[in-house]
Amino acid sequence: MISNSTDSILEKIGGWQVIRLEEVDSTNSFLMRERHLLLQPKQVVLAATQKQGRGRLGRSYISLPGRHLTFSAVIHPGLPLSRLQGMALPVGIAVARVLERKIEGVRLKWPNDVLVKNRKICGILIETTDLEQIPHPVLILGIGINTEGKIQEFPEELRTVLTTLEAEANFQIDREELFQELLAELDLVFEHLLKKGTKALLEEWMIRAAVSGKRVRCLNGTMEDGTFEGLTPEGFPRIRREDGTLYIHYSGDLIHDPSEN
């Protein structure tokens, strides 16, 4: 039985099994509840409307009903939890590769945001869970892309920090086409990751983030300012403090150009 959803449709796209829902609280939460769907990889839940979309650090994901691309996918990386901490970075690369075919100015922000002209156009939520039947953690990756809508349709407090594909491209992007392109790109990224590791992907992330050598501020209960030097092999930012010591930022927010905040 599928709970807390309406009008589900099941179909196959490439190697992905897609469940389409008209409305759900959160696609990640849906998969956490419907745990039988986690037993097989490449299960996808796509929702036309999320009523309680979730973001990182307990934040809400705000979307315009029926006008954004919101979905979650099940991945079985076959890796221990210690090697799953930086998975938002390759997922962000997949999203950026697809979006830059449509619009200009796409950039990545650690750990899970995709920006256009310093405005958020996509958020990524990575969660893991354990199942008795599977020896390694199961990965649930949630992606929310602001596809349609004008900036003025968002709550006033968000209008300076969000954008949409429609606003950037000046025309509506076909959501279904975008969705299928993303599934194909996720296939390529995870195939590379599992066969060749993360080195080349982290190098690509650094190029797409365009943050090397720039001043940043790290927030995680305390505040650390410094220069972004690169990423650890696990995908954590390496920050050089003014006194020359090195700080590894494991969690929390990372703000660019702290003098402007």
Image (cartoon, rainbow, N blue to C red):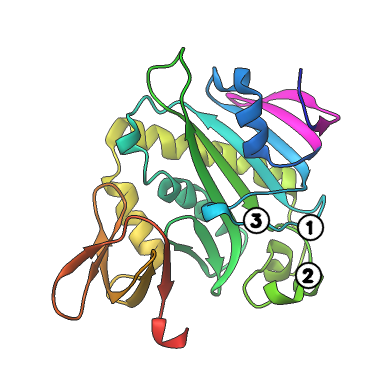
Please state which amino acid type lies under the numbered disc 2. Answer: Lys
**Between residues 240 and 104, which one lies in front from this camera angle?**
240
Which mark's residue is nearer the viewer, 1 or 3? 3
User: Is any part of residue 37 visible from this angle?
Assistant: yes
The image shows residue 197, relative to residue 129, as above or below, that is below
**Between residues 99 and 52, which one lies in front from this camera angle?**
52
Task: Please give the name of the residue rendered at 32% of the width and 77% of the height, measured from the top-left corner.
Answer: 214
Q: Earlier in the sequence, mark 1 or mark 2?
A: 1
What secondary structure is found at the residue carrying circle 3?
loop
Residue marked by disc 2 = 150
- Which disc is residue 64 wearing? 1
- Which disc is residue 60 wearing? 3
Task: Please give the name of the residue rendered at 78% of the width and 70% of the height, measured from the top-left corner.
Answer: 150
Q: Quadrant of residue 195?
A: top left
Magenta segment boundaries in residue numbering: 5-22
**Disc 1 to disc 2, C-alpha distance:** 10 Å
- Labelled pair 3, 2 in contact (Cβ < 8 Å): no
Please state which amino acid type lies under the numbered disc 3. Answer: Ser
Q: Quadrant of the N terminus?
A: top right
What secondary structure is found at the residue carrying circle 2?
loop
